Image (cartoon, rainbow, N blue to C red):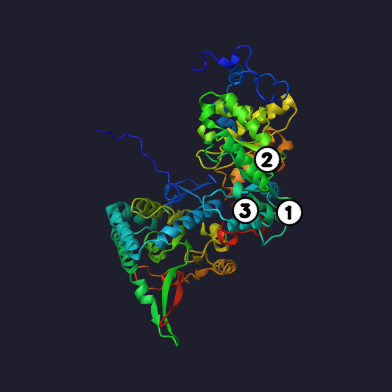
Amino acid sequence: MTHVLDPDALPGATPAVHAPLPPYDDVIRSDAAFRAFLHGLPGVDQVGAEARAAQLGTRSIKTTSKAWAIDMAISMVDLTTLEGADTPGKVRSLAAKAKQPDPSDPTTPRVAAVCVYGDLAGVAREALAGTGIHVAAVATAFPSGRASRAVKIADVRDAVENGADEIDMVIDRGAFLTGRYLDVYEEIVAVKEACGDAHLKVILETGELKTLDNVRRASWIAMLAGGDFIKTSTGKVSPAATLPVGLVMLEAVRDFRIATGRQIGFKPAGGIRTTKDAVKHLVMINETVGPDWLDPDWFRFGASSLLNDLLLQRQKLRTGHYSGPDYVTVD
Amino acid sequence: MIGHDRLAVRKTYKLYVNGAFPRSESGRTYEVTDAKGHFQGNVAWASRKDARDAVVAARGAFAKWSGATAYNRGQVLYRVAEVMEGRHAQFCEEVATAEGLSTSKARAAVDAAIDRWVWYAGWTDKLAAVLGSANPVAGPYFDFSLPEPSGVVAVLAPQQSSLLGLVSVLAPVLATGNTAVVVTSRERPIPAVTLAEVLATSDVPGGVVNLLTGDAEELGPWLAEHADVDGIDLTGAPAGRAMEFEREAAGTIKRVIRPPATEPDWTADPGLSRMTPFLETKTVWHPMGV
């Protein structure tokens, strides 16, 4: 029961490998200190967060604003396929869709990235060469994260060598929920190091964290450890990217920039299937962290079916009548 | 004993979309009166977005409904008749009120409506035999043709006959394996709302039938133009707009049933005329002797 006495807190314990940005450079001096810091974060008012998220979801975005939001959302999509049945052929067709989402309208923007398993990152890299579309790979024993650290690091190195320039890692939820926050932190630091130049997105899997307080703590761990993005979910667990969770994570991102000057990106993933969901997220970003984040470098949607709905809505705006799934590609 | 001062439990007449009873997305309602002009209730007034949601629901339900065996579809439609029979008195009262009919005429209309379900239930597993064929072809092929459902069919239900007319246009769409988005009679929607309650409790999968109470004049163009609607029955289209709806439907080559000049006598034998328009013929050329 580590909350009774933490051996790391004794004098002479070795400090952690990597110190966070000031003013938080000393919070990881021991397990106990880190826990004290994370549990000292202001508690989340769950009812308030849900009410605020629901309120932001009622904004009416129409006509030219809607057209802008749809194009912005398309350019922020991480077009994802994470199935056991993925093949090089499927990744290539996904890449073709990423390059030209709607063949009937060449003015449609490209998506931000294609997200695949690490072994297929090479296929995606080849198919997307010269387009400026990023290749994201999930790693660290995605989606469960249940493997030894050496395996996770090897997974990351492999994905980077295969050509991924963005790595989506999962945190060790088991360690987090048993209170071993420093383990979680050190693992993220180690993965970040293995990423090299690749951007690191840290998946919190909020559906397994249960409380919004936990979501805030996990967000801070990921940001302190050097993650470039914090991401809600793997998409394999429900609930995934709900608006209240997004709100808490965005507030963490905002507070972190105010305190340290470093901007962290945010990626909701899982459960965002409709244009309406996407627009609600855009509204929430604008209202919570401001327009600095309304950019594919700082905000992404992890989604597979969302893109088709965005394209259908885009076609509706262009033609004036409702479109149907026969008019977009089948994934 | 409850006295005469008991508060009445007033009913909220809602839409029927994807197996649920939502209010209109727009929040709109309109007043419905009986044939003599007395207030009957506030009924949900469907908007174009309700129609859009209904089409999504109908599309989602199509694979399962069209994939069910014809025998199974027949059983489900027969079940609708069974459940309607249990609400016979309620339907009689509502049809009499809505259409201003005498008790005996209302009863005849309800009887005919229930029988119509049974009639179409019987047709589901006979269509392929009647409309399909084995084709003699000049080549080493076993060549046969089968009728297959078109997909999502929008139905503008008759404006006058609130129940028998509605069943007469809806049942053939279902019997052939299509899913339906129905805009009910604008002035007489209450029997349709009760029919929705019957459908919800008679093994018809959610989304196979979606009933929108509202104005065919308002929703017609959206359904006619909708790229994910495969056919449209314009029977209840407002006078003078049918040609326009048909032109809009041509943009995505929909199957169309044109409205009759005046509303037909729904008690007449329906024949196959309402089932064949929403069927596609698939012909298979199967090599033989190789």
Distance in Å between CA atoms under marks 2 and 1? 19 Å
Residue A179 x/y as whole percent: 53, 23
Residue furthest toward the bottom?
Answer: B138
Q: In this figure, which residue is indicated by the disc labeled 3?
A: A313
Of mark 2 and mark 1, the one earlier in the sequence is: 1
The residue depicted at 42 percent of the width and 57 percent of the height is B208
Of mark 3 and mark 2, the one earlier in the sequence is: 2
Distance in Å between CA atoms under marks 1 and 3? 25 Å
Question: Is A46 or A259 nearer to us in this picture?
Answer: A259
Chain under numbered label 3? A
SS class of the residue under badge 3?
A: helix
Image label count: 3
Residue B204 x/y as whole percent: 37, 55
Q: Residues within 10 Å of mark 3 (few under 14, many from 20)?
A: many
Q: In this figure, which residue is indicated by the disc labeled 1?
A: A131
Which residue type carries mark 1? Answer: Thr
SS class of the residue under badge 1?
A: loop
Q: In this figure, which residue is indicated by the disc labeled 2?
A: A299
Which residue type carries mark 2? Answer: Phe
SS class of the residue under badge 2?
A: loop
Nearer mark to the viewer, of 3 and 2: 2
